[in-house]
Image (tube, rainbow, N blue to C red):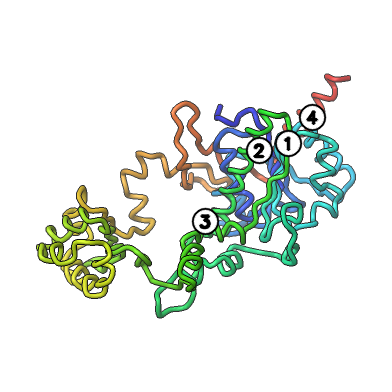
């Protein structure tokens, strides 16, 4: 059933941040009804596809973050559809949306309006710059995407090689981290309602979330008065903590404490380095010369050789691509690749599983993403059945 199987979520979100948040809730058992604008979520048509975009219902982007949800198509500007939405709000636990600030007000469906229909509703928004209800700024109402949030929040300035340009992270952390924090806020609000009967507004801004994400840069600025910048794969205060070129790829080594450093020097047959640089501060002050020592040794090893020699005594790992991830037995043992149906293709596809593991109510993807409006009769029929019973 899932830990959240008692909750119904009305999901008005689209693209990535909002759908990822509601996907987490769905994986944990919540009944998530994705309420899509006419034509559906804009990412339904985004690639990749298995074979033919004309026959497949949606691409991998939509599949990955909308699995296990129901779908109904509503035009909130239409009186009948708006009434249907409000009828669902009356019975819902949570509403989640990621429109620009002020959008729901245009439909007269603001938090304040919805609580007239459901006083203990939990209403959650994900926006680029937060909502005026929790702190008004002149940025609110502006569009934002992951790239904008990473640029403003310091992520790009501290990512990349020291002699290269500011660089975004590969995964969309501006969306995904914000979504995860929003999910935490929703669950905190659910717990509060259990104790008090009181619903509330939950607001998570992407810019705000990136400041939380770059916590190290924030305290460095405060403590030193200097703006941190790019350091490649190295760490601003720890050494060795870096990626090194090997004979057939790259591997990372994190041997910054004294015991790990001594073990690394022993494996490299450089015991004298452990004696000459026994403290964290000494190693950090001489990091350039020591980095060259490690780099020269690493180039003589394959990834398997390097990791094999260090595994169990020094934190080390190969830098893997997704093909290698798909071949990793650990990933399969942890159920981190999940097969789901790809409508319109004669095959299943694999999407990322959930990293949240629970002994009694283990979260799991609950089937493929929905077809557009696939669950209209089921969802709105439930409401009609309730009204008939009440009569």
Q: CA distance from mark 1 to mark 4?
A: 22 Å
**Labels 2 and 1 touching (C-beta < 8 A):** yes
Q: Classify mark 2: residues with Cα within 10 Å, few (<14), some (14-19) or many (20+).
A: many
Position in image of residue 283 (x %, y %)? 24, 67
Q: Secondary structure at mark 3?
A: loop
Position in image of residue 209 (x %, y %)? 58, 56
From the viewer's perspective, tell me whether residue 92 is left or right of residue 220. Answer: right
Depth check, mark 1 against mark 4: the one in front is: 1
Position in image of residue 40 (x %, y %)? 71, 51
Q: CA distance from mark 3 to mark 1?
A: 46 Å
Q: Classify mark 4: residues with Cα within 10 Å, few (<14), some (14-19) or many (20+).
A: some
Depth check, mark 3 against mark 1: the one in front is: 1
In-front residue for pair 317/135: 135
- Upstream in sequence: badge 3 or badge 1: 3
Which residue position holds label 1?
199
Q: Residue at x 88, y 42 (%)?
A: 80
Which residue position holds label 3?
51
């Amino acid at each position: 059933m899932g830990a959240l199987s008692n909750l119904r979520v009305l999901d008005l979100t689209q693209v990535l941040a909002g759908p990822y948040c509601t996907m987490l809730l769905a994986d944990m058992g919540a009944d998530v009804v994705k309420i899509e604008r006419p034509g559906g979520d804009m990412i339904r048509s985004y690639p990749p596809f298995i074979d033919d975009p004309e026959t497949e219902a949606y691409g991998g982007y939509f599949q990955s973050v909308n699995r296990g949800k129901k779908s109904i198509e509503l035009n909130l500007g239409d009186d009948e559809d708006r009434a249907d939405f409000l009828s669902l709000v009356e019975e819902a636990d949570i509403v989640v949306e990621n429109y620009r600030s002020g959008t729901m007000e245009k439909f007269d469906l603001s938090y304040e309006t919805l609580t007239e229909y459901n006083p203990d509703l939990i209403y959650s928004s994900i926006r680029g710059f937060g909502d005026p209800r929790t702190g008004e700024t002149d940025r609110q109402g502006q569009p934002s995407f992951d790239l904008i949030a990473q640029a403003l929040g310091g992520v790009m300035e501290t990512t990349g090689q020291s002699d290269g340009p500011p660089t975004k992270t590969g995964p969309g952390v501006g969306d995904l981290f914000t979504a995860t924090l929003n999910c935490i806020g929703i669950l905190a609000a659910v717990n509060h309602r259990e104790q008090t009967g009181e619903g509330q507004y939950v607001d998570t801004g992407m810019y705000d979330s990136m400041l939380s994400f770059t916590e190290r840069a924030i305290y460095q600025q405060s403590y030193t008065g200097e703006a941190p910048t790019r350091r490649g794969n190295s760490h601003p205060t720890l050494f060795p903590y870096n990626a090194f070129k090997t004979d057939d790829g790259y591997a990372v080594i994190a041997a910054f404490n004294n015991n790990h450093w001594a073990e690394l020097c022993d494996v490299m047959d450089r015991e004298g380095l452990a004696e000459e640089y026994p403290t964290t501060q000494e190693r950090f002050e001489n990091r350039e010369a020591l980095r060259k020592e490690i780099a020269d040794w690493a180039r003589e090893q394959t990834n398997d050789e390097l990791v094999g020699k260090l595994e169990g005594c020094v934190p080390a790992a190969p830098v893997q691509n997704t093909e290698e991830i798909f071949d990793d037995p650990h990933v399969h043992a942890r159920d981190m690749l999940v097969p789901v149906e790809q409508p319109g293709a004669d095959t299943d596809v694999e999407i990322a599983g959930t990293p949240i593991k629970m002994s009694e109510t283990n979260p799991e993807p609950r089937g493929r993403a929905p077809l557009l409006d696939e669950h209209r009769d089921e969802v709105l029929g439930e409401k009609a059945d309730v009204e008939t019973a009440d009569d």
